[in-house]
């Protein structure tokens, strides 16, 4: 979704032509320090009381406990999560838990904005192929965070996935507020009121109840954001929030999804109220892709601890859907500061995403998890005329659908190591 920033400053193209001339060239000297250099100014968020550095670790959301954790903590910090998983498994299987022998399927969905149409199409096509598994563990970032609840709840929500990634336009997601950003009256170049409506449309009270039920059945749904003050990834246990019974749980989950898609500079960040030391504060959460383009579980967490406690025999299979291309894409860059800056940011994000795939690969190897990766084929060359071009998204959805329906040839290693990819469905 970071291409939104390039879109709203009218520069930066990936392979496709993606540009909205919303700002006059005379405004570039003002926009650069405001957007690229993140100059300080007043925002539409109003006065915010940030969590003091000494209380960051103890800050909690309302009356909810143990519903989130840092993405970079050590193994001991995940003790509560580990014990919760062990308890859920024992509750589910009772005295027979140690005799269980089965496959467990993981799904991780990356960011990518409108490129999420690829992952949506792949999942829908996979359903129609007939061998899409029931995922025990689902994670999502940015556009992947919006897809994750639908994918988690299974094929019954495929129609919603198709709708979300084939019918939207730019105006359904956000509207420009360039002048407001220039004078420091807003915290983003776009107003995300339409996106809030979309999140509410697709994350309903009915879905909340279903997610809670699946959580109690031992399944897990996680969404990643970035705590901008702390410069750390935050992983939210959506199932635990849904099952908490808190009257604020639905609104909190919607906030988390919105925050996970809040591209700094383009979209306003999301304030989440927390308490620490008996006082109330506001954390500033933005796009999870700032810290992770895609995530499995933190390297500090190990499912082997759970396996040892239960004594069961689990074969884990991981499926990663990277909603973008991973190969370098040539695009002639104009010798001007905005095109150079946006092209550089785009390149940084692409390489960061590849690095995330390597980190997941190492973690999967350590834990004996079967690694399977999908991404947009390099020969997909349909141009997009805007950030959410319906024609482009439909073409990409169809390509993903066809690949899923035929049996995607999952890559067994990350880019660069993947010499001889082969399908896991053979």
Image (tube, rainbow, N blue to C red):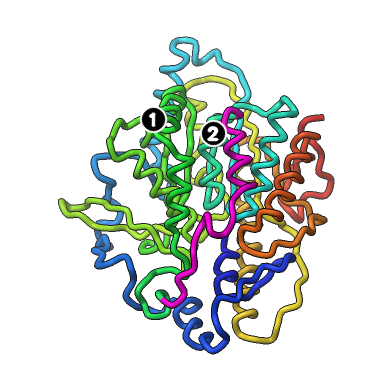
Query: Is 242 displayed left or right of 317 in the figure?
Result: left
- Magenta span dominant secondary structure: helix
Q: Quadrant of residue 5?
A: bottom right
The residue indicated by pointer 1 is 83
> Residue 144: where, in percent of width, then height?
56, 47
**Residue 72 visible in rendering:** no
Q: Residue at x 47, y 79 (%)?
A: 37
Position of residue 341 relative to residue 284, above or below, is below
The residue indicated by pointer 2 is 152
> Residue 107: where, in percent of width, then height?
60, 38
Q: First in sequence: mark 2 or mark 1?
A: 1
**Bounds of the magenta span?**
155-179
| Tag in front: 2 or 1 | 2
> Residue 38: where, in percent of width, then height?
44, 76
Q: Residue at x 70, y 44 (%)?
A: 373
**Residue 125 visible in rendering:** yes
Q: Residue at x 64, y 71 (%)?
A: 19
In what element is the residue under mark 1?
helix
Position of residue 228 relative to residue 164, above or below, is below
Q: Residues within 10 Å of mark 1 (few under 14, many from 20)?
A: some
């Amino acid at each position: 979704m970071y291409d939104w920033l390039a879109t709203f400053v009218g520069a930066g193209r990936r392979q496709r032509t993606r540009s909205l001339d919303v700002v006059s060239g005379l405004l570039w000297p003002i926009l650069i320090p405001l957007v690229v250099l993140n100059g300080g100014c007043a925002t539409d968020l109003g006065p915010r009381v940030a969590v003091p550095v000494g209380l960051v670790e103890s800050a909690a959301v309302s009356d909810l406990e143990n519903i989130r954790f840092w993405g970079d903590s050590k193994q001991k910090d995940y003790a509560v999560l580990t014990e919760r998983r062990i308890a859920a498994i024992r509750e589910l299987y009772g005295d027979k838990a140690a005799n269980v022998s089965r496959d467990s399927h993981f799904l991780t969905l990356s960011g990518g904005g409108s490129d999420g149409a690829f992952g949506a199409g792949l999942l829908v096509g996979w359903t129609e192929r007939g061998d899409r598994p029931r995922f025990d563990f689902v994670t999502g970032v940015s556009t992947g965070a919006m897809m994750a609840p639908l994918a988690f709840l299974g094929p019954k929500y495929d129609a919603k996935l198709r709708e979300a990634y084939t019918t939207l336009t730019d105006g359904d997601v956000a509207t420009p507020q360039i002048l407001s950003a220039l004078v420091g009256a807003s915290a983003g170049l776009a107003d995300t009121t339409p996106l809030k409506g979309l999140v509410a449309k697709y994350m309903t009270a009915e879905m909340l109840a279903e997610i809670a039920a699946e959580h109690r059945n031992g399944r897990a749904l996680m969404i990643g954001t970035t705590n901008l003050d702390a410069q750390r990834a935050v992983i939210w246990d959506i199932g635990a929030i849904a099952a908490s019974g808190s009257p604020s749980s639905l609104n909190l989950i919607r906030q988390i999804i919105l925050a996970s898609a809040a591209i700094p500079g383009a979209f306003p960040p999301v304030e989440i109220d927390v308490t620490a030391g008996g006082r109330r504060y506001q954390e500033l959460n933005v796009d999870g892709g700032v810290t992770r383009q895609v995530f499995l579980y933190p390297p500090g967490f190990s499912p082997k601890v759970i396996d040892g406690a239960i004594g069961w025999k689990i074969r884990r299979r991981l499926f990663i859907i990277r909603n973008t291309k991973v190969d370098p894409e040539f695009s002639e860059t104009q010798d001007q500061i905005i095109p150079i800056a946006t092209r550089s940011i785009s390149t940084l994000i692409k390489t960061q995403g590849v690095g995330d795939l390597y980190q997941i690969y190492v973690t999967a190897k350590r834990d004996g998890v079967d690694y399977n990766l999908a991404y947009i084929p390099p020969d997909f060359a349909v141009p997009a005329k805007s950030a959410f071009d319906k024609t482009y998204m439909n073409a990409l959805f169809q390509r993903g659908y066809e690949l899923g329906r035929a049996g995607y040839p999952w890559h067994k290693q990350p880019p660069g190591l993947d010499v001889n990819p082969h399908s896991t469905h053979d």
